[in-house]
Amino acid sequence: MHKYLAYGTYGWLTFGGTMHLIIDVISGYLRGKRPPGPETTLFYGMHTAYGLGQMLVGLLGLIVARNAMQVFGQWPALAFGIVAATAWLIFGFIFIEFWEPKVIAGLFLALAIACAVVA
């Protein structure tokens, strides 16, 4: 159970970060949804960092789950996932007006807590 939960947790984060990057950044840029300016640069930079951060942590988690599943039974790895999810939620509530990134981070937090409980 713990193995599948770890794969699901970090797989969800990778998927969510990829979708955030595709929908909010790439799609918005290609459609020309925002006029050029400093606010647009900040918007795309912030959302790119948010989405890429989720993708990279998710991929790192999947690699660790594949090669060293026992790491997810130790508190540093579990704490890293919970702290990362909390940081994404705080960042999302302060800076992002869309609700989807908050849901992605919230579900990741719930899965990370479940993974910690099962471990």
Image (spheres, rainbow, N blue to C red):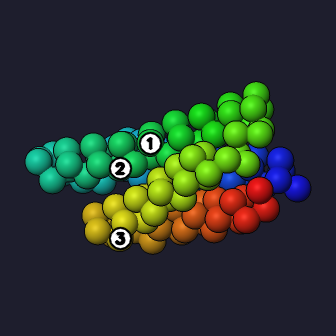
Estimate the x, y position of residue 17 in percent, counting from the top left: 52, 48
Q: Which mark is residue 53?
A: 1
* Residue at the far front in the pictured view: 75
Residue ID at (11%, 47%): 37
Q: CA distance from mark 3 to mark 1?
A: 16 Å
Hey, what amino acid is under mark 2?
His
Q: CA distance from mark 3 to mark 2?
A: 13 Å
Residue ID at (25%, 52%): 43
Estimate the x, y position of residue 28 in percent, counting from the top left: 37, 50
Identify the residue position indicated by label 2 in the image.
Answer: 47
Q: Quadrant of residue 64?
A: top right
Mark 3 element type:
helix
In this view, the residue in front, 103 or 28, is 103
Q: Quadrant of residue 119?
A: bottom right
Q: Which mark is residue 93?
A: 3
Q: Nearer the viewer, mark 3 or mark 2?
A: 3
Label 2 neighbourhood size at 10 Å, few (<14), some (14-19), many (20+)?
Answer: many
